[in-house]
Image (spheres, rainbow, N blue to C red):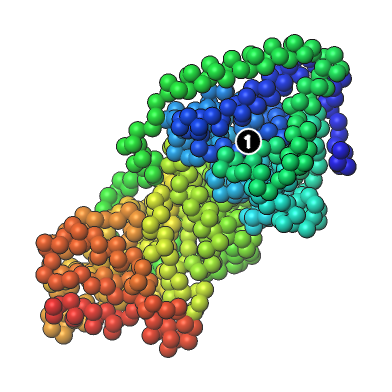
Amino acid sequence: MLNLNKVTKKYTLKNTDKNTLKTWYSLLSLGRKLDERAPNYLKQAIGWSYHAPYAGHDAIQLAIGQVFTLGEDHLFPYYRDMMTALSAGLSAEEIILNGISKATDLASGGRHMSNHFAKPEWNIHNVSSCTGNHVLHAVGVARAMNRYKHKGVAFSSQGESSVSEGYCYEAINGASNEKLPVVFVFQDNGYGISVPKEDQTANEFVADNFSGFKNLRIIHCDGKDVFDSMNAMTEARKHALEKQEPVIVHAHCVRIHSHSNSDKHELYRDEKELAAALAQDPLVAFQETLIKNKLFTKKELQEMDEEAKKQMLDAHKLAMKAPNPDPESIFDFVLPEPHRPEGFPEGTHSETGERVKFIDALNSTLKAEFRHNPDTFIWGQDMANKEKGGIFNVSKGMQQEFGKERVFNGPIAEDFILGTANGFSRFRDDIRVVVEGAEFADYFWPAMEQLIECSHDYWRSNGAFAPNVTIRIASGGYIGGGLYHSQNLEGSLSPIPGIRIVVPAFADDAAGLLRTCMRSKGPSVFLEPKALYNSKDAMAVIPEDFEVPFGKCRVRREGSDLTVLTYGNTVHHCLEAAERIASEDGSSIEVVDLRSISPLDEEGILKSVAKTNRCLVVHEDKVFGGFGGELVGLVNEKGFEMLDAPVKRLGSTFTPVGFNRILEKATLPNTDKVVAAMRDSLAY
């Protein structure tokens, strides 16, 4: 027996009533029968092509599910948590429906990998296959519980090896810093697939890596022992609730079988080790304890086993009759329906009056939306410290008006910033979160893992959950920023289904698009060309409560000889170039500001091309691999017969952006380069 840290004992064999022991044994027996039957579905080509057996984790998983309190807590199980899900209340049928990927599977309707159990209506969450990343979501929910004074705990469960992931450290650091009611359960079976845990960390037990963290309790328990596990989980929940701070429960388990049905543990575990693992079977140990102490006879346990077998077979019959997913359903739940602007259906206006700076448009719109919806929050790096409001002061004055509960700083951990936003929005559907995803777009890459999560949460959960998050990112160059301060992201982000991407070029569109993003369900990426923050060219009159719908381009200059498709910083270069050409030779150039990258206004683009019969694409990002290639493909595919000339592109050179202004100018598009490209298209 391991020398484990002691916890306050509540459950012992003597003081646990017989009905409770019967319930526990019945669950353990049913779970083990499902666990052992799962591989047969694959052998029969029925499904369950991914199964991670939990045998050896029985006790801790039983305890997690039993301590989970419906209506109060949120649970984020991992792919080995079959017993956890069953103990928390899922039925055998619901387990099998997930395993064989039926349309009525509660977790995802067959969209997500088997062995990812969930019941959204009970706040048992559908988590990713990206191991351990749900710890950030659990911390986000716990933050919402804290803000809304909700009595409950967020439970996050995972294997010990996935704790090596950086976002796990970010989650635990953030939870301890903010003192949030979240319980992190590490189920330690000694292996990460075939990698022994000594290859993962220097400490024998990974929980000890966090022993220096303040506001964090660490509890070790024997995850193979029902009573020790129940005591540990009960104490962990009690501590998290009463102290409003996180707890790590490090459960020492054993893995009896291979990591999954695609793994052969005989390749890295010898017969002696396998025999030793089997000898520690928690179910057998519990059986022997109950019989030895004359609480149940062997016959009584066998009768419970037979009843569990019957439950499993009955569940199998029902699950086999369930419908398979409809192939056409792949298009359902990619994104929720967005907010539809009523007063400005095309996102245009003819308002006159005082022109407003781009940066002031963002600031005033954020404040207006915070007043409009009191369940709106914003956080990120450098968001609010005294008179400072963001690295560019976009959030200036917000904390003073709305308080630290709604406007606050995050650590320099982009994955944490976005991951907790995802989790926070899970608490209530009316919550809207705005995050400054990174101080500059170039620093957003660590958060890409969580952006991917946001992108397919709605689809993966079969429409049960969408993160209502607006991700603000200062992008682009023309500021002399060089590497890590001049990058564009739209070419990399646009191939990802399930997110909206907008790039305003004028203050009115900045206000209108931001308002629409913040009022919509689902994730939106709001790219802010930072060179325009204080630009006179980007100033505009902004009607009160102005809104711009997604997927609507705006013709910024009418023309008849050439269509220029552009967005962001280069809109202004194109407008200047069009005026220069008009004054020099009278050519009429139409400048179309896309505003929205995804969704894209195909109809508006093709309408303009039909009018001019020529098309030039101009954007700040690199030509090679840039979003302009998608625009060229669209025009060629759907507008080829309209064209009198090839569709051409202008963008940055296929190089990084240098810091010296001479190097930057050589790299990025400018008015002179746009004029040359326009003349080339006109002359063809």
Q: Which residue is at the front of the view, 365 or 75?
A: 75
Q: Is residue 369 visible?
A: no
Q: Is residue 106 left or right of residue 612?
A: right
Q: Which residue is at the front of the view, 648 or 258?
A: 258
- Is 472 rendered above or below residue 344? below
Q: Is residue 482 left or right of residue 557?
A: right
Residue 41, given in percent of the width and then of the height, sits at 51, 30
- Is 100 rendered above or below residue 454? above
Q: Is residue 440 visible?
A: yes
Callout 1 secondary element: loop
- Quarter of the image with the C terminus is bottom left
Q: Which of the 4 quarters of the picture holds residue 189?
A: top right
Residue 334, given in percent of the width and then of the height, sits at 39, 44
- Considering every residue shown, the one lying at the far bottom of the view is 662
Report the amino acid beneath label 1. Pro
Q: Is residue 242 left or right of residue 448?
A: right
Q: Which of the 4 quarters of the picture holds residue 66?
A: top right
Q: Which residue is at the front of the view, 563 or 345?
A: 563
Please name the residue shown 69% across and 24% down the image: 28
- Quarter of the image with the N terminus is top right
- Within 10 Å of disc 1 (Cα), the crowding (few <14, some 14-19, many 20+) is many
Q: Is residue 25 left or right of residue 12?
A: left
Residue 37, given in percent of the width and then of the height, sits at 58, 27
Q: Which residue is mark 1?
A: 53
- Is 261 rendered above or below residue 345? above
Please name the residue shown 17% across and 83% down the image: 583
Please name the residue shown 19% across and 62% down the image: 636
Residue 673, given in percent of the width and then of the height, sits at 29, 82
Please name the residue shown 36% across and 68% down the image: 625
User: How many numbered discs sit on the rendered protein?
Assistant: 1
Q: Which of the 4 quarters of the picture holds residue 648?
A: bottom left
